Amino acid sequence: MEREETERRETAAGAATGPARGLSYSAMDAVVGAAVVLVGIVMMVDNHRIGADWGDDGPQTGYFPFHIGAILCIAGVAVVLKAFLGADRIHSSFVTWDRFRLVLAVLVPTTLFVLAMQFLGIYVAAVLFIAAFMRVLGRTSWLKTLSVSVGVSAVLFWMFEVQFKVPLPKGPLEALLGY
Amino acid sequence: MAELDALFHGFSIVMTWYNLGMMMIGLVLGVIIGVLPGLGGPNGVAILLPLTFGMSPTSAIIMLSCIYWGSLFAGAITSILFNIPGEASSVATTFDGYPLAQQGRAGEALTASFSGSFVGALVGVLLITFLAPLVSKFALRFGPPEFFAVFLLTFCSFVGTDKKTPFKTIISMMLGFGLSEIGMDNISGELRMTFGWAELLRGIDFLVVVIGLFGIGEILVSMEEGLAFEGKSGKINLKVVLETWRKLPRYWLTLARSTIIGCWMGITPGGATAASFMGYGIARRFSRNGNRFGTGELEGVIAPETAAHASGTAALLPMLALGIPGSATAAVLLGGLMIWGLQPGPLLFVEHKDFVWGLIASMYLGNIVGLILVMSTVPLFAAILRIRFAIIAPIIIVVCAIGAYSVHSAMLDVWFMLLFGVIGYVLKKLQYPLAPLVLALVLGDRMEDAFRQSMLGPGTGLHVFWGNPLVGTITTLALVMLAWPLLALAWRLLFRFVRAGRRSPG
């Protein structure tokens, strides 16, 4: 056990030359495996409540999901075991902080966009989202930013609201304009 | 040959300027829809169905079905060039299509995929033309046990061919099944795994999951490479086309196999998505280059696309002949038929000859024109998608959000899309195969229904799956494909565990 600890620390140190920091691949593997086991347990518990046996006229409602939960638990445990004991563990990082920052650079604005969509309607939210993306991450000029973001939103509005008549979430602005 | 007469009659209907125009519009719209993530075949047809109420049913269904062909063709474009499947049925095309594009062979991949699609669809239409009455009689013999056995075979062939990570494949599949079971149960009406959330009543739609996993998730993963969301160059010039066509006859077995699989999955409701996965899985199992699948094998592109197209086309057969839709889009088209007051079934062939044979004739034409259209416009579209990442990425995300929302007009679905985007990112990086998840999600309900319907009534048990030769063969095949690699793996693991236990001081 001690030998493996040192090994892991060395590899981590080795990988930490340059701006590379992050959690290890195998650790993440184990975490996700454990999460799967958790999901499996939840499934089994909830479906046991509804009845997971073989009733009079065939399987009960919870039969399928219960067994799926069971299989998930087993497979999840297998993955966790493999992550801890497998011969081909990967010590390199799951994701380094640099790269993760880039991922966050898309994920965070997208989350804000969906939030905005809920309150401002999709068209206004789209304008803000596209404009923010272009301006902050793409460093585009104001003119281009505004024309593209407003233009795209307007085209989408025309397409979906007027032509296809597909109702998309709208907010206070559209209400003001009478939509 | 009464069918040929009727077919020529159908051609005469299609060859009017109006109907040809509808065909072209349908194809172009279909390509656009097929390429955009989130607006898929069933979605696109459903959205545009109300627009066609003013037209005659024949023209309307010509346009709608051409939208479907267009989207089937075009789904491969983004799969190959951007690793983002434009359609659920083109997910399997990304496995080998994108690697091919990365190697600079995008033109070959695209040509192969379109040509395979063309062949698959052509055979599908021929099938419909000549076999409609015969096949409908056979499909009537398929009961729930047979359906379940076919589904089982599809999944087992997927696990069986994954030598690296069978457990992760199983997890992926089970997650998909689990997701498919959230919501109200078809048979008993009880709520499952909704945890008191009324909004989960209708369950989680697979479209939302696909948009999240493959749209948002893919964008997140590719972000790690930096803000360079570059698609690969998709130039198709005549030379590449001819070269690839010369290579195609080598794959005649794959083409034949996938076409049969596709037609089968279309007629017996399996759907284009399942067909494409099954085509891919079985091609990988039985091909000489099976172990090179996933690294850029042309065969790995031909197999799923041919199957998907054959299935999408053949799915219209049971819809027209029996009123049983063979795919989600066929189901939407069926709805359209009923709205227009046309009853599907044998009577349709007699009372509404114009409609049926006009549609069938348009399928031939639409296939050929569609092929030419996509082959010539790919560079155009690829050029559009090469606009700066900072501009194109948010637009794609917005369209994804629209796609996710428009499925059920539910804001919750957009949040789910985001959630699955993150899940997709993590799972992809940990090398969980996502395809089984989607497949299980799409087929989960139907598979479970088939199982429970097989078990209805006292005195039934698992033995019903060997009740007759047809079912027995399929079931046994499925179990064989599943068991062999698992047994091998279990043996290896046990061996290694014992060895490791003996090594460490403990």
Image (spheres, coloured by chain):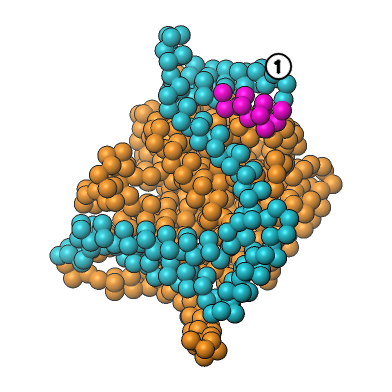
Chain colours: A cyan, B orange
- Disc 1 crowd rating (10 Å Cα; few below 14, some 14-19, many 20+) is few
**Residue B110 is at least partly visible in this image:** yes
Residue occupying image coordinates x 48% and y 19%? A161
Q: Is residue B18 above or below residue B113?
A: above
Secondary element at image label 1: helix
- Identity of the residue drawn at 38% across and 27% down: B340
Callout 1: residue from which chain?
A: A
Residue B228 lies, with reference to residue B301, above or below; the image says: above
Residue B49 is covered by the magenta coloring: no
On screen, residue B318 versus residue B162, left or right, reads left
Type of the residue with mark 1 = Leu
Q: Residue furthest left?
A: A56
Residue A159 visible somewhere in the drawing: no
Pick the residue in front: A171 or B241. Answer: A171
Which residue has dot 1 on it?
A143
Horizontally, residue B3 falls left or right of residue B21, namely left
| Quarter of the view holding residue B235 | top right
Asked if residue B76 lies left or right of residue B375, the reply is left
The image position of residue B295, as x and y in percent, is: 69, 61
Position of B315 relative to B282 (above/below): above
Q: Please tell me whether residue A129 belongs to the stretch shown in magenta.
A: yes
Task: Give x and y (percent) for residue B394.
Answer: 60, 32
Across the whole image, how many numbered discs are drawn on residues? 1
Give how far across and how far down residue B338 sits, in percent: 36, 32
When asked about the image quadrant of residue A107, the answer is top right
Relative image position of residue B232 (x, y in whole percent): 74, 45
Q: Residue furthest bottom?
A: B502
Q: Residue at x 51, y 30 (%)?
A: A113
Looking at the magenta stretch, what is its main secondary structure?
helix
Segment tinted magenta in the rendering: A128-139
Residue shown at 81% from the left, 48% from the top: B240
User: Which residue is at the far top?
Assistant: A177
